[in-house]
Amino acid sequence: MPKDSYIARSRGISRLYAHLVLTPKYRKSVISLEMLERLIEIVKDLCEKWQCDLIECNGEPDHLHVLFRYAPQMQLSKFIDNLKSVSSRRIRSEFESELRKVYWNWDKGFWNESYSIDSCGHAPLPVLIRYVENQSKLLLRSAQSRDSPTRRSP
């Protein structure tokens, strides 16, 4: 199904898109390229379970963007709470050693309590997709320079 077509349900049709931005606790720059790849997998899985379409997911060391399409019956706040709790639990389990170096209060979760959610009705979808796709360029450049052969070890 094309990402810009309507979702048909028994009581109507809809074309609702949302742009979610999540930040790690204290806006720390902790999201590595490997962690970002895992977060994208987790978000894809949760979107399928919640019956919404993931359009794009990407991020930088201090935030994650999720662009998705959803039906009007879905309760966004419950979806976001579930996405944050499941991804936090999995990321803290799978990347424990990296995160323990940064977070002293380990039991408080991975994500900041607040988030940004915006409807995408006024911006053309291709512009939003390009914006989210380009989010990891800084992270990729950082990883490439780290792996560069010209880098000296201490």
Image (spheres, grey):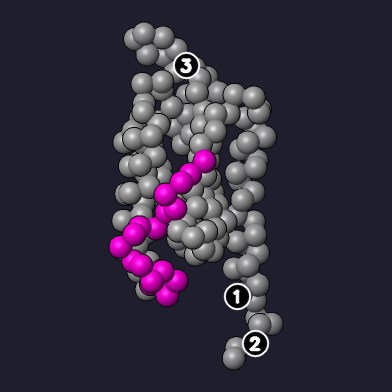
Which structural element holds mark 2?
loop
Tell me which residue sits at (42%, 54%) in the image. Answer: 111
Of the numbered discs 2 and 1, the one sitting upstream in the chain is 1
Along the line of sight, the residue nearer the viewer: 33 or 24? 24
Q: Residues within 10 Å of mark 2 (few under 14, many from 20)?
A: few
Q: Amino acid at mark 3?
A: Ser
Which structural element holds mark 3?
strand
Residue 62 sits above or below residue 72 on the image:
below
Along the line of sight, the residue nearer the viewer: 17 or 133? 17
Is 94 on the left-hand or right-hand side of 5? left
Q: Residues within 10 Å of mark 1 (few under 14, many from 20)?
A: few
Residue range corresponding to the magenta coloring:
99-116
Label 2 to label 1: alpha-carbon separation: 10 Å
The outermost residue toward the bottom is 154
Q: Which mark is residue 99?
A: none
Does the magenta segment cover residue 85? no
Q: Nearer the viewer, mark 2 or mark 3?
A: 3
Q: Residues within 10 Å of mark 3 (few under 14, many from 20)?
A: some
- Residue that label 2 marks: 152
Q: Give percent across and percent down for residue 49.
A: 31, 36
